[in-house]
Image (cartoon, rainbow, N blue to C red):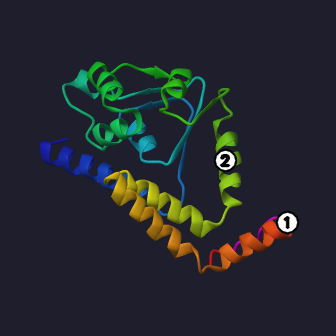
Amino acid sequence: MSPLEIHSFVNSLGYTFSFIEMLEIPTIAVIEGAALGGGLELALSCDLRICGEDAVFGLPETGLAIIPGAGGTVRLPRLLGKALSKEIIFTGRRIGGRDAMSMGLVNHCVPAGDARLKALEIACEINEKGPLAIKMAKKAINEGLETTTASALELEEFYYQQLLNTKDRLEGLAAFAEKRKPRYSGE
């Protein structure tokens, strides 16, 4: 690819990953096998990451005399912190599934081949919750991370207030009082 084509391709990836990150619904990456370079950048754009124990992660771009260009230098430090992210990016080292779990890169590491099932289990658990509450929680978390603690608390209060007059909130309270499972409508 020419330099212009490379620029266009990397920007396209970056925009796609940002779009995924900004979706109002929770996203779960399932990793079986390798998530290297753009594959890891894609996984980082998701809310949760589940891997099989044989999974391999890394951002090997510095070995090619480039840097991760589709969000890796932004999302990885926000997830793992600056020092650990610098080590991963500077060395280009590959990380196994169990190590990814211990450092917080993935939420769960399960036996190889079981990552999809674990992701579906978590998705079902999330799906039982109030959809508007999940949406507001995601907004409060994502936007709150980008600002001061005081501003983040104001955002949390704002999103909490959005839920007070919803049918789902009333249904949740009624279900709790009646000791039954709620039936949320997303209203």
Badge 2 local density, few (<14 within 10 Å), some, or many (20+)? some
Q: Secondary structure at mark 2?
A: helix
164 or 109, nearer to the observer = 164
Check residue 3 for magenta coloring.
no
Check residue 183 for magenta coloring.
yes
Q: Which quadrant would residue 94 be assigned to in this image?
A: top left
Reply above or below: 38 against 88. below
Badge 1 local density, few (<14 within 10 Å), some, or many (20+)? few
Q: Main secondary structure of the magenta part?
A: loop
Q: Which mark is residue 122?
A: 2
Amino acid, disc 1: Arg
Q: For this view, does 55 lie left or right of residue 128? A: left
Residue at 27% across / 35% down in the picture? 68
Q: Which quadrant would residue 70 be assigned to in this image?
A: top left
Amino acid, disc 2: Ile
* Disc 2 from disc 1: Cα separation: 21 Å
Reply above or below: 136 against 147. below
27 or 10, nearer to the observer = 27
Residue 123 image point, x, y percent: 65, 52
113 or 130, nearer to the observer = 130
Magenta region: 179-184
Q: Which mark is residue 180?
A: 1
Q: For this view, does 113 lie left or right of residue 41? A: right
Q: Which quadrant would residue 98 be assigned to in this image?
A: top right
